Amino acid sequence: MNDKELLNRLHDHEKRILKALEGEKSLTIQELQQLTQLNKDSLEKASLWAKVKGILKIDEEITEFIELTKEGEEYVKEGLPEKNLLKILEKGEKSISSLNKKVKKFNIGLVWVRKNNWVTIQKGQLELTTKGRKSIKEQLPEEKILSQLREGKQNTKSFDKIIIEKLEKRGLIKQTIKKKREVSLTDLGKKILPKLEIKENIGQLSPKILKEKLWKNQVIRPYDVTLPSTKINPGKKHYITQIIEYIQKIWTDMGFKEMTGPLIDASFWNFDALYQPQDHPARDLADTFYMKTPEKGKLPDSQLVERVKSTHENGWTTGSLGWRYKWDPEFSMKTVLRTHTTSLSARTIAKLKPEDLPVKYFAVGRCFRNETLDWKHLAEFYQTEGIVVGEGVTFRQLQGYLKRFFTKMGFPKARFRPGYFPYTEMSMEIEVWHPEHKQWMELGGSGIFRPEVVKPLLGVDVPVLAWGLGFGRIIMDKYKVDDLRKLYLSDLKQLREAQVWLGV
């Protein structure tokens, strides 16, 4: 910009600073305050604006000072408690009870003589060590620094940092930092100074100015929107919370109702109701967290329990033979941290009646598995679950729901391949195309619940579309996080810089 444009963009405070520097090599902030009659805050802000525009130069000198506290001054006069204690010990007094009466701040002195190995304690008596006797005759580093500070020597560079830290922790000294700023004109500032005029201007419009048309005879101060501004960190929801709420909106927009349930649940709902045998590897301690408190949960009504039991032992009436073992209701009562949100689907189906159908439900919640922690595995993770229950629902509709969901999550290209899951048949896995990495990414499993799951819970054999999808990898990709563990750190920088999730 030319000189005229620059002059028009100057704030009244900047102009007053330039005028004050006319004929001066440099001035301190305090000197400028007196000349400009600006308060310190306004003066410093205006100086920084002028510096950004290239018309001022600011030189800063930082000086560190160490000063004695009130207690530190007391120790300089009366001596350190530990040194005073050593001196009385040297005279032959050894009894702790007696020393406590004779030494001021005895407890503090005792702490330090013990910490420095200057004494030993036996049967209520203190005994000087060789190191302690030697310390009586020497000036301690702490004493030396305190004396120098009393004399006014405050050059921090000459002091031992370790001793300084020790004295500061004891509250005997305090460190202060003093900044001296000097402001001077740059060549550009000197160049535009002769053309500078200070006129009364309008910095903010008011009803009076508009009503009386005062703006006609005064200059309206221009604003330079290209100047850097103070960064603002407004409050916002954690990005995981934002994504969860966005996922909830996707499903509700498609007509789904949300289902919720406990994080700690009986094995009955987590495994048995889903037709997983009681000797299934997924029930091992290596995969599942079993609870000590509460150790057992409640089973539902006896008729439902009997139907699930019969299905496990005999295969219900679907033509299958069941798992052919003695089903144990005690084992089914063991409580676990739920390993999937599918336990919510089982609970929801059990509450339905045939006349309620068709229905659509979803869930978003935490699940827990006994995983070895690394950059892509955690013992706790989030999952979104869904079921569609009703006569006539089809496998093709299942694909449509999932494709719609991932399109809204930013992955319009999805494919499905056959898979195996214990409680669905047919089953499929979902993969989405990652446009940046140029590869397919697996994000979950789905299928139609087996009759052995549905009939004991609902009482009739009705198709139930079901899916369970993880979205941890989506979060990692969206926020460029290379380690799942970082999602749960209290990292203010990461949280402040995280984009607001707007979805698609």
Image: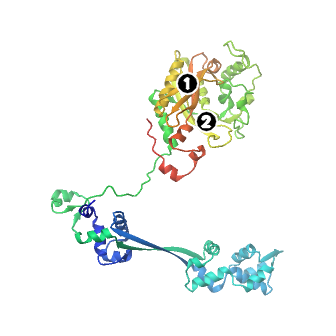
Query: Quarter of the image holding residue 26?
Result: bottom left
Crowdedness near tag 2: few (<14), some (14–19) or many (≥20) residues, C-alpha within 10 Å: few
Query: Quarter of the image holding residue 160?
Result: bottom right
- Residue type at numbered disc 1: Phe
Report which residue position mark 2 lands on. Answer: 262
Secondary structure under the numbered disc 2 in the rendered image = loop
Q: From mark 1 to mark 2, how far is it between C-alphas?
A: 31 Å
* Image position, residue 462 (x, y; %): 57, 16
Report which residue position mark 1 lands on. Answer: 416
Q: Is residue 145 above or below residue 312?
A: below
Number of callouts in the render? 2
* Image position, residue 237 (x, y; %): 48, 46
Secondary structure under the numbered disc 1 in the rendered image = strand
Q: Is residue 382 above or below residue 32?
A: above
* Image position, residue 414 (x, y; %): 51, 27
Query: Quarter of the image holding residue 79?
Result: bottom right
Foreground residue among 221 and 322: 221
Crowdedness near tag 1: few (<14), some (14–19) or many (≥20) residues, C-alpha within 10 Å: some
34 sits to left or right of 110: left
User: Is residue 357 something one can see in this rendering?
Assistant: no
Between label 1 and label 2, give the one nearer the viewer.
Answer: 1
Give the residue drawn at x 55%, y 80%: 155
